């Protein structure tokens, strides 16, 4: 079976996705390693074993992510390409949500920080980002909870109460405000008590990160006609993400979507790069003065 591999080389994890010749998803896989080179070779080997493939089945490899720059040669003598992360995530997010690239969509990539990618009329544009993301959640969890395991923070948050940490509109006014329900947040952590319960702090931290990301996404959609926002990245796997983003969606009239395999948007987007784009990239002189066997830039 012929297959194309998309590999997203992140700072701490490597994500890999395989697409069959007919465009169908073979599977996905995530690995951790001490460095990007070890990680990419380990990911390929693990993927082949997991899905019963052989090296001869792989026709192309497309790399993306911050670690892609560390790979400057064809992997296993298989034609290897590099694709910019924003292009890969934009393409992958739309594919996972079932949207065509010719439409209008905002794809949000929640990693260590957060990136906002506008897909419009076939064009994929990185319009900006925020330093608020997974790194923020880890850092604040360590500082406030002495806990760096986000899975444990999420578990704690399940029994938390936001009324003990966040100041709401209802707390500061007796009358209604236009477009702002009483339970809307006026100030994250604006009502936190001394010696708060860890569960309340954990929920407050998740609410802070997800609300900031959601509201920035809403601002990015203003005056654009975009109503669909596709959320991708590791943070989307946390249970509270759907609940909190749903509240932001109500306030701003948006449709937030967390598709299946949202963690693998970059890898899937890289693997699904259009065949004609790969052909154009292959036709260009190889990087590095034309030396054969070097990784080529796709987008």
Image (tube, rainbow, N blue to C red):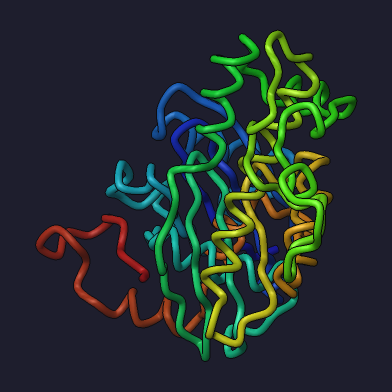
The x, y position of residue 273, in whole percent, is: 52, 73
Q: Residue 84's spot in the image, x, y percent?
A: 38, 62
Closer to us: 163 or 170: 170
- Asked whether residue 141 appears in the rendered view, the answer is yes
Q: Residue at x 59, y 52 (%)?
A: 213
Q: Residue at x 22, y 60 (%)?
A: 292
Look at the image and tell me in which quarter the C terminus lies. Answer: bottom left
Taking the image as shown, residue 213 lies to the left or right of residue 116, namely right
Residue at the front extreme of this rendering: 174
Q: Quadrant of the N terminus?
A: bottom right
Residue 133 picture location, percent across and down: 54, 41
Q: Position of residue 53 (x, y in %)?
A: 69, 49
Residue at the image position 58 percent from the left and 83 percent from the top? 101
Q: Is residue 5 visible?
A: no
Image-quadrant location for residue 150: top right
Relative to 19, does residue 52 appear above or below in the rendering? above
Given the current orientation, which residue lies at the most extreme right position?
A: 159
Task: Please report the residue visible at 33 percent of the width from the left and 75 percent of the height from the top.
Answer: 281
């Amino acid at each position: 079976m012929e297959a194309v591999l998309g590999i997203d080389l992140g700072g701490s994890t490597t994500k890999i996705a395989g697409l069959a010749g007919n465009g169908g998803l073979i599977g996905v896989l995530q690995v951790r390693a001490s460095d990007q080179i070890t990680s990419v070779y380990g990911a390929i080997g693990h993927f082949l074993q997991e899905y019963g493939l052989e090296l001869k089945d792989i026709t192309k490899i497309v790399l993306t992510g911050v670690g892609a720059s560390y790979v400057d040669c064809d992997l296993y003598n298989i034609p290897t390409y590099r694709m910019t992360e924003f292009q890969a995530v934009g393409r992958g997010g739309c594919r996972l949500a079932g949207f065509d690239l010719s439409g209008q969509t905002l794809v949000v990539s929640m990693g260590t920080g957060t990136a906002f990618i506008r897909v419009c009329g076939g064009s994929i544009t990185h319009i900006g980002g925020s330093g608020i993301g997974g790194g923020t959640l880890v850092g604040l969890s360590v500082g406030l909870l002495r806990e760096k395991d986000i899975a444990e923070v999420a578990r704690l948050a399940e029994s938390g109460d936001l009324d003990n940490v966040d100041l709401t509109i209802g707390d500061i006014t007796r009358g209604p405000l236009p477009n702002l329900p009483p339970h809307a947040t006026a100030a994250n952590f604006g009502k936190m008590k001394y010696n708060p319960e860890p569960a309340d702090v954990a929920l407050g931290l998740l609410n802070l990160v997800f609300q900031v990301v959601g509201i920035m996404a809403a601002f990015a959609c203003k005056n654009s006609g975009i109503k669909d926002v596709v959320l991708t990245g590791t943070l989307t796997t946390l249970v509270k993400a759907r609940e909190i983003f749903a509240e932001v969606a109500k306030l701003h009239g948006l449709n937030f979507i967390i598709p299946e395999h949202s963690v693998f948007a970059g890898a899937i987007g890289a693997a699904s790069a259009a065949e004609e784009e790969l052909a154009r990239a292959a036709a260009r002189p190889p990087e590095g003065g034309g030396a054969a066997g070097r990784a080529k830039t796709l987008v």
